Amino acid sequence: MMTNPHRGEVEVELAGRSVRLLATFEALARIEGETGAGTFALARRLESLLKGQDGEVKASEVAAVLRAGMAAAEGRAPTKEEIGQLIAEAGLINAASAAFAF
C-alpha cells in the first residue's frame, strides 16, 4: 500500500494488519467532536502516554482517532465494534502508538 505523507497519510501495523490513516480536516473535526478534546491536546496526551509519563488517554479516544483516520483513508468508517476488535487484538498501547503516528 502506497502512502503519501505530504497528504497527511500514514500506514501503521495493527494486529498483523496494515492500516492506512488519512488526516483530513473532516477527520480532525470528527475526532474533536467525538472526544471533546482539541487535536493538539490529545496528541500531547498520547505522546506523554507513549513516553511513560502521565498521559491519560481513554480507549474511546484512541478508537475515535483510528476510526476517523481509517474513514478518511478508506472512504468508509469502520464500526465501533470493528475498531474495538482491532484495538483488542493489537493491544491498547500499540493502538495508541498508531493513533499518535496519525
Image (tube, helix red, strand yellow):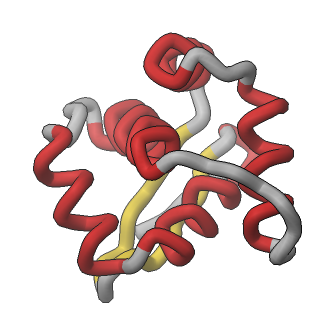
Kindly identify the residue that appears in the image at 52 percent across and 46 percent down. Answer: 58
Q: Is residue 35 left or right of residue 78?
A: right
Q: Nearer the viewer, residue 52 or 27?
A: 52
Q: Is residue 35 left or right of residue 70?
A: right
Kindly identify the residue that appears in the image at 44 percent across and 51 percent down. Answer: 59
Q: Nearer the viewer, residue 72 or 55?
A: 55
Location of the N terminus by quadrant is: bottom left
Residue 54 x %, y %: 83, 60
Query: How many numbered tags mark residues here?
Result: 0
Q: Quadrant of residue 51?
A: bottom right
**Is any atom of residue 100 visible in this view?**
yes
**Is any atom of residue 4 visible in this view?**
no
Kindly identify the residue that appears in the image at 69 percent across and 51 percent down. Answer: 56
Is residue 43 shown above or below 38? below
Is residue 63 shown above or below 53? above
Residue 31 x %, y %: 52, 25
Q: Is residue 1 left or right of residue 78?
A: right
Kindly identify the residue that appears in the image at 38 percent across and 64 percent down. Answer: 19
Q: Quadrant of residue 6?
A: top right
Q: Quadrant of residue 24?
A: top right
Residue 41 x %, y %: 81, 31
